[in-house]
Image (tube, grey):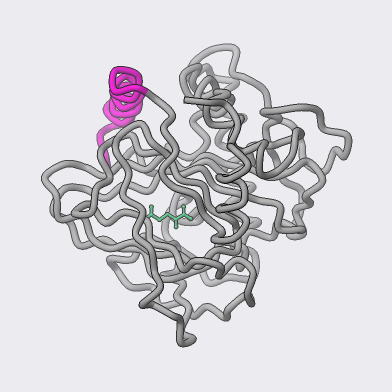
Amino acid sequence: MRDTLSPEQIASYERDGFLSPIPVFPRDEVQRLRDYFEAFEQRFGGIEKAVGRRTDLHLLTDWGFDVVTDSRIVGPVTSILGPDVLLWSMNWFIKEPDNTKFVSFHQDANYWGLEPHDVATAWVALSDAGVSTGPMEFIPGSHRGELYEQHNTFENDNLLSRGQTIEADLPIKDCVMTPLAAGEMSLHHVRAVHRSGPNRSADRRIGMVLRFCATHVRQTKGADTATLVAGEDRFGHFELMQRPNAEFGEHEMAIHAEAVMRQGKMIMRDEPKTDTIERQQE
Ligand SMILES: O=C(O)CCC(=O)C(=O)O
């Protein structure tokens, strides 16, 4: 496992708008991360109840802060975004076993408000995300094309906040599925068109989804927060967040709640209402 991408990997990302797979964590380490995450879910009342709190766990836990600053993730990201990098948010895309939830074709750049588009996601598999689990699928080169109009479908099984869906004719036959083993990650560009299908396997498909941007990127929708994970921030476009002093401390819980609420509200500005904070993030 190397901490930066090779020239061939960078060229492949620039051509396709995604890169996969990239090995990150050995089995024992990824299992430990999964255990931490599932212990967090139990602490907050189980899978369903914890959904509203799981965004930006790096502001509440040491393991979360360690993982978003881990050089095995951040190093490859700097190969793409340059030496000065912010973590904008930490999200979770989880499909429970034998489940009909899916993600429709969309482009993240359509609604996050981040400009310019020097923004990339590290999708880290905390469980096996093989073909039967509904792994990520990308349309190669779509990040170099247009920003498509998206229609809010509000479909029940769609994991996106508004079921936002591109309705234009897409070259679906070119779509590439990117199955991952637990401990591997993919990277994708904020303009890449992507989707994923249902999880037909017997295990949860747990995607820890880290959104990174270069420090020169601005939030065009309002005041926003981020965490410096590499280099320095010479721009000051975001309020910088810090490692928590105490795991789940009172102060940390308040800061976390405020940051997640503010980001959720801002992203959803001028959008129809949705039900939970977490759904607003996705
Ligand atoms: O995990 C998935 O299936 C979808 C994730 C996604 O849309 C994203 O990371 O932008």
* Residue 211 vertical placement versus 267 (above, below): above
Residue 219 coordinates in the image, percent (x, y)? 75, 53
- Which residue is painted at 64% across and 77% down in the image? 146
Q: Is residue 199 visible?
A: yes
160 with respect to 190 (left or right): left
Q: Which residues are magenta?
A: 26-48
Q: Is residue 51 above or below residue 113?
A: above
Question: From this viewpoint, which residue is outermost toward the right?
Answer: 234
Magenta segment includes 7: no
Membership of 27 in magenta stretch: yes
List the single residue furthest toward the bottom. 169
Main SS category, magenta section? helix
Left or right side of 165 for 269:
right
Asked if residue 55 lies left or right of residue 143, the reply is left
Task: Find residue 259 and report its image quarter.
Answer: top right
Q: Position of residue 210 (x, y in %)?
A: 52, 41
- Residue at position x 22%, y 42% in the image: 204
Residue 129 image offset from top left, x and y in percent: 28, 45
Count all numbered tags in the image, as a single digit.
0
105 in relation to 45, above or below = below
Q: Position of residue 203 (x, y in %)?
A: 16, 41
- Does residue 28 sit above or below 264 in this rendering? above
View quadrant of ligand 1: bottom left
- Describe residue 116's horizontal placement relative to residue 145 as left or right: right
| x 42%, y 59%: residue | 275
Q: Residue furthest front?
A: 8
Q: Nearer the viewer, residue 38 or 138?
A: 138
Residue occupying image coordinates x 53% and y 31%: 73
Image quadrant in which you'd find residue 84: top right
